Amino acid sequence: MSEIIIRRQHDKSLAEARTAAEHMARELQEEFDLDYAWDGNRMRFKRPGVTGELTLDAKEVLLSIRLGLLLFAVKPAIERAAHRYFDENFPV
């Protein structure tokens, strides 16, 4: 199993951060066929070979993705896509 972790500071309100995360989740759902659900300020998502969560707080967003063995070879492409979504929704 392989893991991708992305942590980014943000200057949004918690409501704005959740709106941005929801937008990002919908895009990921469309592009990668992910199922996701919110539990408070934590969004959990999954699809065959991928599980993860995105956690929000007042100053930071944390993304943790766990890839199954079969997706290890495409980890760099998945990591680039995750950074691209973060850049669009949580710009530095």
Image: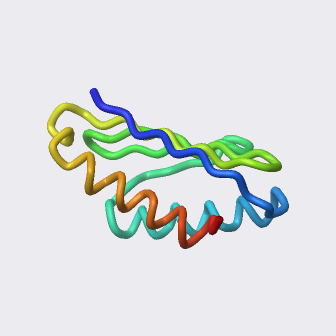
Q: Position of residue 23 (x, y in %)?
A: 58, 69
Q: Nearer the viewer, residue 19 or 11?
A: 11
- Can you say whether 34 is above or below 12 in the image? above
Q: Position of residue 24 (x, y in %)?
A: 53, 65
Residue at point 20%, 42% (across, down):
71
Q: Position of residue 78 (x, y in %)?
A: 31, 54
Image-quadrant location for residue 17: bottom right
Residue at point 42%, 63% (across, down):
28
In the image, is 31 to the left or to the right of 12? left
Q: Position of residue 69 (x, y in %)?
A: 18, 31
Residue at point 60%, 43% (across, down):
62
Residue at point 50%, 67% (across, down):
26
Q: Residue furthest front?
A: 92
- Can you say whether 68 is above or below 40 in the image? above
In the image, is 30 to the left or to the right of 9? left
In the image, is 48 to the left or to the right of 38? left
